[in-house]
């Protein structure tokens, strides 16, 4: 909360994401503070006023600009509105300063190469083996995420192909909001209708693809669910297990390759593709780190190990071994021959996930459509983790045979190949987090049996859990669980 004077030329801060949603025919704009998780709902009139606050106008100028768009307000009322936003920490500074980073037209400089390091553009592309994608074309991935990004050219092409969508043919702002804040920026986010991309047709087909072919879609949609990460040896090309189609493709030959086989090095990739880079050192366990090369070698050894019948148990046992032995060979043996999952050890993790999912479900109920998949998935996860809070039910689930062991094994293989276990959490905690996700996914079918039975996104519970956790901030539960433990 800020107690200082609001900026004379206000604008939405870079850490605030404005997203337009249509619930039925009612328009709502949701401000999401990425730093605090705070949500604020605005009406269309308030959004027009705020969108005119681009940091170049004082309040009087904002009122005039908004009036030209049919949103009339008195200056004192507008001043009170901006004072409220400022008090909530949602406004940026008068000048660009540090807050302008996300909008800079100048691309950040590439990190300097270490002496003797090979040019990253020459690194080979190492594609996840033995996998090809069969997309069912029913749009599950187009209705679970909060943001679908378009660059200026992609947005203009979309509006030209489908000028009827939200009557946005000549007016960019009718379909899109800035990726961040209200300052002009390189990327825009499409409006959502009942949680679905505005360009998604009723039967789940992308209307841009239908009108203009696959190249008419934004780059992020064309490359999804492929992920790219440079580990210093190669660029690992893997797949995000966040769409039912990914898991439905396991073991099926003849699908589309993750990457055009003609692309062989990083320099062959479209320069707009986001290629993440592993840090020089990674946290293996709280207070213990290892070099990037050591972690990459360990990851390859684990990927070559024989997975146990219960992958979740293997991950939990491996986490405990890492905290004692580090990246030693013996730790992987604990993965292959794990102890049974202990309900008492899982309980605080499930409780933390339930707390976060239940909070988000309450927030979603205030503004999301009942048909919104994100709202439903969050509620299902909250219900599943609540049920697993019953010790007898959790124990019974852990004693039951794993329904889809091939799906769990593939989810781990894809995560290892794409280094998706390495991030903000120490590796040992990330392993426990993944185990918890698998356990929740096992419980999900009983929760969605009624209302979600005919939804293609529910056919693969692991993918639904993965998408909801990453796409809607539920994955922060793991840090809370670790701190509580």
Image: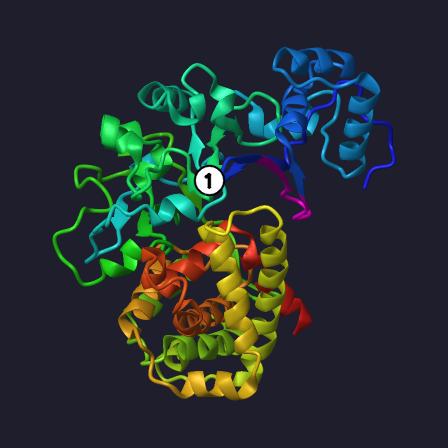
Q: In this view, does 286 lie to the left or right of 166?
A: right
User: Magenta segment range?
Assistant: 28-39
Q: What element carries label 1?
A: loop
| Residue 286 seen in the current view | no
Would residue 293 appear left or right of 109 to someone viewing this image?
A: left
Q: Hey, which quadrant is residue 265 in on the image? A: top left
Residue under label 1, please give it: 114
In which quarter of the view is residue 475 placed?
bottom right
**In the figure, 160 relative to 424: above or below?**
above
Snapshot colouring: rainbow
Q: Quadrant of residue 467?
A: bottom left
In this picture, is 50 found above or below 418?
above
Residue 118 screen position, x and y as percent: 35, 39
Q: Residue at x 48, y 57 (%)?
A: 376
Q: In this view, does 477 lie above or below 120?
A: below
Front-most of 343 and 368?
368
Q: Where is residue 384 in the image (x, y as percent from the top left)?
A: 50, 71
Q: Quadrant of the N terminus?
A: top right
Question: Residue at image x 52%, y 20%?
Answer: 105
Q: Residue at x 63, y 16 (%)?
A: 70
Between 211 and 472, the one lying in front of the other is 211
In the rendered image, the quadrant that contains the C terminus is bottom right
Q: Where is residue 472 in the image (x, y as percent from the top left)?
A: 53, 51
At label 1, counting other C-alpha atoms closer than 10 Å, the crowd grade (few under 14, some 14-19, many 20 or more) is few
In the rendered image of this protein, does residue 449 appear above or below residue 29?
Answer: below
Q: Can the viewer see residue 463 in this picture?
A: yes
Residue 246, position in %: x, y? Answer: 29, 55
């Amino acid at each position: 909360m800020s107690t200082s004077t609001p900026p004379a030329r206000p604008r939405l801060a870079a850490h605030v994401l404005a997203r337009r949603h249509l619930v039925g025919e009612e328009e709502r704009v949701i401000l999401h503070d990425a730093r605090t998780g705070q949500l604020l709902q605005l009406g269309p009139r308030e959004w027009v006023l705020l969108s005119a606050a681009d940091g170049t106008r004082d309040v009087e100028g904002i009122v005039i600009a908004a009036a030209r768009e049919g949103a009339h307000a008195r200056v004192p009322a507008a001043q009170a509105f901006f004072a409220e936003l400022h008090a909530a920490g949602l406004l940026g500074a008068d000048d660009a300063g540090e807050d302008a980073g996300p909008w800079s037209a100048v691309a950040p400089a590439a990190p300097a190469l270490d002496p003797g390091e090979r040019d990253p553009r020459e690194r080979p592309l190492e594609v996840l083996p033995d996998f090809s994608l069969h997309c069912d074309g029913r749009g599950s991935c187009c209705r679970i995420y909060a943001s679908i990004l378009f660059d200026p050219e992609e947005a203009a092409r979309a509006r030209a192909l489908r000028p009827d969508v939200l009557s946005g043919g000549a007016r960019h702002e009718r379909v899109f909001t800035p990726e961040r804040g209200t300052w002009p920026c390189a990327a825009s986010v499409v409006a959502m209708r009942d949680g679905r991309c505005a360009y998604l047709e009723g039967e789940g087909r992308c209307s841009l693809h239908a009108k203009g072919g696959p190249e008419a879609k934004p780059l992020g949609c064309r490359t999804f669910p492929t992920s790219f990460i440079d580990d210093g040896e190669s660029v690992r090309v893997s797949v995000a297990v966040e769409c039912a189609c990914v898991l439905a493709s396991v073991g099926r030959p003849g699908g589309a390759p993750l990457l055009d086989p003609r692309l062989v090095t990083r320099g062959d990739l479209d320069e707009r593709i986001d290629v993440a880079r592993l840090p020089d050192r990674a946290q293996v366990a709280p207070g213990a780190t290892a070099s990037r090369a050591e972690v990459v070698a360990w990851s390859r050894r684990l990927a070559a190990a024989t997975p146990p019948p219960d992958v979740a148990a293997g991950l939990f046992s491996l986490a405990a071994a890492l905290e004692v032995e580090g990246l030693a060979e013996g730790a992987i043996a604990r993965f292959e021959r794990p102890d049974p999952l202990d309900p008492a050890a899982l309980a605080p993790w499930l409780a933390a996930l339930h707390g976060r999912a239940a909070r988000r479900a309450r927030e979603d109920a205030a503004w999301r459509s009942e048909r919104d998949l994100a709202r439903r998935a969050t509620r299902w996860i909250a219900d599943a983790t609540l049920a697993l809070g019953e010790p007898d039910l959790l124990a019974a689930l852990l004693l039951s045979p794993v329904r889809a062991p091939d799906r769990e094994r593939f989810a781990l293989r894809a995560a290892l190949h794409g280094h998706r276990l390495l991030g903000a959490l120490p590796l040992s905690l990330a392993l426990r987090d993944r185990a918890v996700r698998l356990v929740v996914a096992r419980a999900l079918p009983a929760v969605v049996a009624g209302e979600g039975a005919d939804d293609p996104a529910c056919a693969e519970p692991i993918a639904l859990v993965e998408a909801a956790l990453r796409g809607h901030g539920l994955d922060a539960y793991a840090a809370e669980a670790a701190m509580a433990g």
